Image: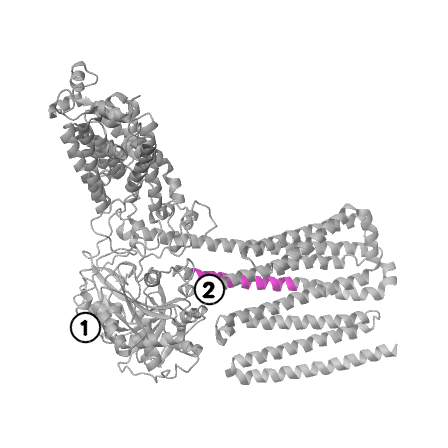
Amino acid sequence: MQATKIYSFHGGIHPEENKAQSLRLPLGRPSLPSELILPLGQHIGQSSRPLVKVGDKVLKGETIAINNGFLSSFLHASTSGTISAIEERLIAHPSGLSDLCIILAPDGQDTWTTLEPLNDWQTLSKTDVLAYLSEMGIVGMGGAGFPTQVKLQGAHKKPLSHFIINAAECEPYITADDMLMREKALELILGIEILQHLVEADKVVIGIEDNKPAAIDALTSMIKQRDSKVQVAVVPTKYPSGGEKQLIQLLTGKEVPSGQHPADIGILCHNVGTCVAVYDAITFGKPLISRFTTLTGDALKAPQNVEVLLGTPVSHLLEYADSEPKKLSRLIMGGPMMGFTLNSAAVPIVKTSNCILAASKKELPPPAPEQACIRCGMCEQACPASLLPQQLLWFSKSQEFEKAEHHNLFDCIECGACSYVCPSSIPLVQYYRHSKSSIREAREATVKSDLAKQRFEARKARQDAEAAEKEAKRLARQKATPSKAAEKKKAAPAKAAPTVAAAPAATDESKKLKVDLAIGKSKLKKLQKQLLEAQENEHLEEISNLQLQVTEQEKAVALLEEQLAKTAEAAPTAAEAKVPKPAPAPVNDDIKKAKIDLAIAKAAVKKVEKALKKAEEIQAPEIEAIRQQLKEAQQRADELENALVNPATTIPKTETTAQAAPSSVDADMTKKRKIDLAIAKAGVKKAEKNIQLLKEQGKNESEIEASEWPKKLIEAQEKLAVLEAEDTTDTVAKSQAKAEPEMDLANQIKKEKIAVALAKAQINKLNKRLESAPEDADKINQDIAATEQRLQRAEALLATLIHSQTNTQENR
Amino acid sequence: MALLRITSPHTQRAGRRTAWVMQMVILATIPGIVVQTWLFGWGTLINVMIACITALLCEAAILSLRRRAVAFFLKDYSALLTAVLLGVALPPIVPWWVTVTAVAFAIIFAKQIYGGLGNNPFNPAMVGYAIVLVSFPVPMSQWLGVQSLVSAQDTLTFTQSLQAIFQFLPVVESHALIDAYTMATPLDGFKTKDLLTAEEAFNTVPALHAANLNSWLWVNLAYLVGGLGLLWLRIITWHTPVALLGALLVMSGFFYGVDSANAASPFFHLTTGAAMFGAFFIATDPVSSCTSNRGKLIYGAGIGILIYIIRAWGGYPDGVAFAVLLMNFAAPLIDYYSQPRTYGHQKAKTGLKIGEDN
């Protein structure tokens, strides 16, 4: 075994270790409490979804909640018993919040459910093993509770140079990992070997501080015994060497680039507890239902480590460790450097609870009053991230958040080393937390207001378009009245088609706009949700995947903008379509109309410009398309302006247009149709892309099904089908338009064609649903049969209609 | 039970409060005060006493005017430190009202008006010193000589020092008395050597006699010892003093090498005047100096260079006060351009440009 070179990191502190107290007694196993409180959110990401209901009887290890999305986890019953409630309970949270918890009343039998170990993990595909780990509810037990399978998945981005097992445990007081290594050295090594099989790193290193000689001995002898390739790297005791980034620097000399993850530089870190949990899951099929936790502090007469069932209330453990309530002044979950205070002992132990510190007033006295910062720079010398804490404090106090960000506020890991050394007792970390959350809030607000602005502008554009359309119609009516008689004679057969076509065109237009708006709204909602996630994310210093989703969402927003821009462009087209319908308009009206058109065109140009800018900002791939649009819009605006400037040329042109009214209307209609079709196709494509993306991100089928995209895909496909049907019908209709009597027939054919298309789409949709929800197969099959019948009927009718139409034509 | 609810971290390094920092710096001046008293009589101690009383009174008065907790802030020892630093910097027989003016100005104008401890852009002690240096040049230029060199062949006794300090100058009798004890400092002597070469000056000018040079060597060594103590206690970092003394060494070495006939040796520059006192006690004032390690290097080097420039070509024999004040001006700017490279970043950020984050 070759020794690993140990590097060093900047700063760090040497607080009193206080680890001996909890190592005097052997590992304890507290009795079953009267109830277990199992919060649904014990991990980073979305809360699990309960699978049980009140009154259900569960066995130990039974799944009681399943994951809810990509970044979520399973939850299992810690013992056998009855679900007595699913309700809000106080949870272990820095702000003392409540959350939904499954309350389990143990029956005292502690009966295991049937365990299904994954014996063939070496031959199974890695994806299957990861899925299995997910089902076993395994999350990072070091602190953040990051779902292990997600982390392992992320590790496949790049070939791994190092797989680091974090056994540093640098926080004072905590000895849970130390005890775990002493008690379960073999399990740990085996767990590491399983994980190594999954990630295939070049080097596997356990990083451990030199203040745990017993654990180091246990590990090295176990490694020798098993002739394992795992190395043990002993690092000097210095807080925060157990910070992921610091341990990576200590063992590899590399730094995790700001805003990235260890996986990006080919390094994966796992906590020792996680490795043992993986071993237990794979070898025995035991889900994560218990963990090692340190009970320590002066207020406990019997400080010790315990293997405790998840959900055990802290009060039960305090009792077990013989606490002296009189002495207890501060109850901390976690260590004294980064832990958070609990204001009630009723909260439960969760997957990430590594320590309960019941401190007396003497042990952790209340902080001294804050004094002025004298910029002594002790914080700077202690900062493991090489920040300038004193400058960050200055900017935080004066709310100069931009400067704070520029001084890399977000690289702060909130380890507390600066506050620890501060001679002026300034709660620096608290200032940074406040600044960070203020900045996040501001960012969120900016996004929100941007969206609101976009929505407002879209609405305005639509209203403008509608107003212009109305105006055009009014003008048309005005013109139509006097020249009606003459017009009727001349253009009666020709007029029929445009009027019929124009009316649905107008309703179609607003319909489409409304649909677009609805899509935009739902998109907005989704974006907000995503942002919230990203925020939570950042709070825990994490997750590139969500970052990806956010950028993706931004792209989607750009796409939406493109659509809106298109709509705005299409609106004037539609409006225009109806204007030349009547006889030539007087010059005045023409100019008026031209002015309106110009205004609309200019608005469109502005809009597209904005979209382009936005797209450029986020480097969206649609930039080229938007540029093209901009060019077109600009051209149109120029043309209109030209037309406005030279009314003389406009008049004859208008006349020509008017003379050619029917055909021009037809052309415009086709154009609009084509745009509608294009938008619908883009919608289908987008939905498909999103589904593809979700698949790439490794979401399973049910998750994809749960998202809104498949639904959207089907909707978009339907819409496309309808539009296509309309398109073909329209062509037929146009050819029929010459003869008025045939109009009814043509319309009927059109209707039936739409019906056929709808039915086909319906069947398609049902088939999809059948695939995803086989349990409803009977009902869906019935539906399919019914729809097929409808389809057949519609097709039969359609055939008859077409037949009669051909007959009519032949007869003529 | 009422559980305390506060955010992490829940523990602090015991004992090292701001007051402790200030006390340690005050204690670190003791070797220097002892040597100055031994060489120049009781004047330094009396000055320190006057300065301390003035500082506490001024601080208390302004704090109560600003409606701040007087006792709480007085207990941080920062006013006392300013007073001590000023007291040892002023000439030992400077009239009491000069000391009072300097200290009052330092506390009231250089410190409290900006918002008190932690908010002053300039080193209060040096502001006070500069004010009296430009306002009262005569008493400020009267340093005592070592007993072997002055005409009285003795140092002032305690009562003589008290008399000198509390009688208005110039008083004929005491003036005569005083002149028997005073002498130019070596820096003064070298500055006024006029057309003499360096060698001639060292042989002829009384202020540049070995005994006088040695007395200032002792003073500087004493402050060096105190400064090393502060380094050992990690109250200051090595960056500022090393950069300051290094720059002074390089500057004086260079010009000594170029023109040894007219320039003094680096050793002379490092062991006379306020070189060590300035390097370890004045330039390291954290509030008004640069804050990052790189910044401190630039800041210290700037002071070192300015000290040499003022000593060699400026209007004053020593230049620590003005050099420090000038670099105080530059400190915020230097801070923006000397940020350390943060963990996980390719290179350090500079300036305050927003949006080009790496």
**Number of numbered discs overlaid on the protein picture:** 2
Q: Is disc 2 placed on a helix, strand or loop?
A: helix
Which chain's residue wears label 1?
A: A
Q: Earlier in the sequence, mark 1 or mark 2?
A: 1
Check the image and report above or below for A266 versus B108: below
Image disc number at residue A546: 2
Which residue is the extreme one toward the top?
A: B172
Q: Are marks 1 and 2 in contact (CB under 8 Å)?
A: no
Residue B346 relative to residue A174: left or right: right
Asked if residue A7 lies in the magenta stretch, the reply is no
Query: Crowding at label 2, few (<14), some or many (≥20) Cα neighbours within 10 Å?
Result: some
Q: Along the line of sight, which residue is nearer the eye, A452 or B80? A: B80
What colour scheme has been applied to the protein in the rendered image? one colour
Residue A519 forms part of the magenta stretch: yes
Say which residue label 1 marks: A26
Q: Amino acid at mark 2?
A: Leu
The residue closer to the viewer here, A797 or A532, is: A532
Q: Which region is colored magenta?
A: A511-535
Which quarter of the image is occupied by the N terminus of chain B? bottom left
Same chain letter for marks 1 and 2? yes
| Residue B62 sits above or below residue A406 on the image | above
> Does residue A628 show up?
yes
Q: Percent from the top left, x then y, of residue B170?
A: 21, 16
Q: Position of residue B55 (x, y in %)?
A: 23, 32
Q: Label 1 sits on what residue type?
A: Pro
Side (left or right) of A348 relative to A403: left
Given residues A747 and A719, the one toward you in this image is A719
Q: Chain of mark 2?
A: A
Identify the main secondary structure in magenta. Answer: helix
Q: In which quadrant of the rendered view does residue A535 lie? A: bottom left
Badge 1 marks a residue whose secondary structure is loop
Question: Looking at the image, is A652 positioned above or below residue A529?
Answer: above
